[in-house]
Every structure is written in structure tokens, then in C-alpha cells.
Image: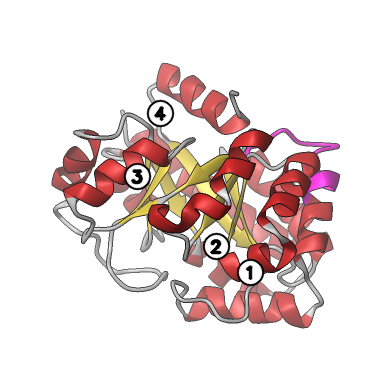
Amino acid sequence: MTTRIDTCFARLKGENRPALITFITAGDPSLATTEALIYELEKQGADIIELGMPFSDPSADGPTIQASSERALAAGTTVSKVLALVKKVRRRSQIPIVLFGYYNPIFARSPEKFAREARDAGADGVLVVDLPPEEAGELKPYLDQAGLNLIYLLAPTSTDERIRLVAERASGFVYYVQVTGVTGARQGLPADLPEKLAAIRRHISLPVGVGFGVSSREQARSVGRHGDAVVVGSAIVSRIGQSGSGRRMVKEVGRFVAQLRRGVEESRQ
């Protein structure tokens, strides 16, 4: 089954442009604001939205995204409400949406039920940070049945054996975490990115998105020269946290995403 993610990458390959993938946490600071942000991100050039499902005990998120999860949870955000938001967004937008989170809430809900509800809501893919391919057997069959992509992470420390395993089981795209550690903006980006991506592409034909640390138009341009997608999360979430709520914040975030989009477009010129 072809998802909106597959269609998006096929279109961008024809345009010789990497995708811009933007992450925001659902419910930060409110679900109504998240809905407005999704439309603004799409309007300003995002190609795919990663929609974080807030979780109280994250292992891969730095202070910025941890704080956004705390704000969202304090506002009463639940998995059910996130799925309802996706369903509402689908009335106006067909932008690909990846549900991004941790396995505990999915397990508690039941993987089968989660996959069915995510499909019915209109999600396109799922990325579960703490679910490596060796342990994804409880969830992947249900996502496959629902026609949803299961997106895996790779890191600079990933071995050839792990890359080959991800190549066998991933769909949609692969998310390469270009720096070790947690999420968050970095002043500089690793110089060995081309070599790392070449090692991944020896085994994987899916698009490879690159994230963690991208926080400016210049960095988006640099990463976009090598990756099939540029993923930006903390730098966007930071602006949400600093700018409060309301239309002014949404516009401020939109202006930043427009800059990132220009960087992505410049990367192949």
C-alpha cells in the first residue's frame, strides 16, 4: 500500500529536492494551537509533519522537547486526543503525518487498537523511539495491516548488522540521528555525514531523513545536500515555548519554517 509519505518522497525525487520534516508536540500549548501550527507549517513549506505524542518519561528527548511534553501533558493531552486532532486535520489537509512517541502508551492501549485508530484518524506512519526492530514484532504486523509506515532510527553508532536489519523491516523512510545524545540544537554538525549516509545507502534504498541538531537555514542547506529529508524539531519547539500561545506565536514559527524551507531548496542549487 502506498502512503502519503511514499507519494511525497516520490514527488520530491522528481523535483530533486529533499523533504522538510518538522516536529511539534501535540497539545503544546494546546491542541487547538497545534492544529493551527500544522496548517501554518504546511503553508510555509513543511512536507511532512512529525506529531509528538507527549510522554512523561522520554529517553531520547532533550530539555526543550521534554518541556514541551510537560506542557502538553499539563494541558490534558492524551493519545486519544492526539488521534482526534489528526482526524480533524484531515478535513483540511493531506500533508503526511507521522505519529512520534514511545511504546508504553501504545502497549497500554494495545498495538492492534492503536494501529487501527491511527489508520482511521488519517495518520501515515509511526515512529516509536524506544522500539528497536528486534522488538517491533508486537506492533509491526498491525501497522502493516493498517497500511501505516513504521519508521526506524539509525545512529552514528549503528552497526552494519543493525542497518541491514532496519533495511529488511522499515518502510516510508529511515530517520538518521546524526549526533549521539538527546535531541536539541547544535552549533556545529558532524563532518562525517556523507560517509555515514553512504554506509546506510549501501543497504537501504528507502529515503533517509537526517535530524537532531538542525536549527538554522544554513544547517538545513548543509544537511539537505546529503539527506533525502531534513528533520527539524527542537529549534521549532523552542520557539513555541518562548513565544507563548496565540496567532502571533503561530506566525513566528511559520516565519522560521519558511527560512528552513529556503535552506532546503538552496541545498540542491
In this picture, residue 46 sits left or right of residue 75? left
Quarter placement of the N terminus = top right
Tell us which disc is closer to us: 1 or 3: 3
The kind of secondary structure element at disc 4 is: loop
Q: Is residue 99 placed above or below 6 in the rendered structure?
A: below
- Could you classify mark 4 by the number of other residues whose Cα lies within 10 Å: few (under 14), some (14-19), or many (20 or more)? many
Residue 211 at what x, y percent from top left?
38, 55
Marks 2 and 3, the one that precedes in the sequence: 3
Q: Give the range drawn in magenta.
A: 86-96
Label 1 and label 2: CA atoms lie apart by 7 Å
Amino acid at pointer 2: Ile
Q: Which of 63 and 259 is in front in this view?
A: 63
Amino acid at pointer 1: Ile
Q: Where is mark 2, residue-wise?
A: 236
Label 2 and label 3: CA atoms lie apart by 28 Å
Question: In this view, which residue lies farthest toward the top?
Answer: 14
Residue 179 at what x, y percent from top left?
28, 64
The residue at the point 18 percent across, 38 percent down is 198
Q: Where is mark 3, residue-wise?
A: 166
In this picture, residue 171 sits left or right of residue 113? left
User: Can I make out residue 110 in this image?
Assistant: yes
- Could you classify mark 2 by the number of other residues whose Cα lies within 10 Å: few (under 14), some (14-19), or many (20 or more)? many
Q: Where is mark 1, residue-wise?
A: 240
Labels 1 & 2 near each other (Cβ < 8 A): yes
Amino acid at pointer 3: Val
